[in-house]
Image (cartoon, helix red, strand yellow):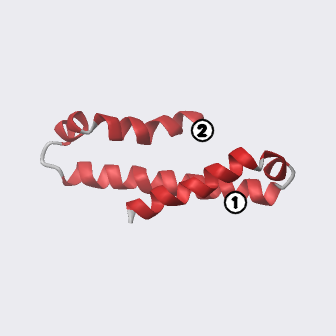
Amino acid sequence: AMLVAALLILPVLALEQYQRDLVRHSPTLTLVLSVATAAIWTAFAAELVVKASASRHTLGYFKDRWLDAVIVLLPLLEF
């Protein structure tokens, strides 16, 4: 399921990058892309939280998977 979410971000990023004028002039498309991006990153964050919660040692989980945590948390700085 997370592989599908990872693949779904590619067309969103491609549209944002290569169709800038279209996105800039279409409030609806801008909203759709923003919602899609937020939903995908929320899914990644939820997966990270669920896996950390299921771990016996939550801090150890984040220590071992610090790169996953950074990848999930960095886009939150944009908001």
The answer to whether 63 is drawn above or below residue 55 in the figure is above
**Residue at point 63%, 57% (across, down):** 35
Could you tell me the amino acid type at mark 1?
Val
SS under mark 2: loop
Could you tell me the amino acid type at mark 2?
Phe
Query: Spatial distance from mark 2 to mark 1, Cα to Cα?
Result: 16 Å
Residue 63 left/right relative to 11: left
Q: Residue 31's image quarter?
A: bottom right
**Residue at point 29%, 55% (across, down):** 50
Residue corresponding to mark 2: 79
Q: Residues within 10 Å of mark 2 (few under 14, many from 20)?
A: few
Q: Earlier in the sequence, mark 2 or mark 1?
A: 1
Q: Total number of numbered labels? A: 2
Task: Locate the N terminus and report the quarter of the image it occupies.
Answer: bottom left
Residue corresponding to mark 1: 32
Residue 16 left/right relative to 42: right
The answer to whether 57 is drawn above or below residue 42 in the figure is above
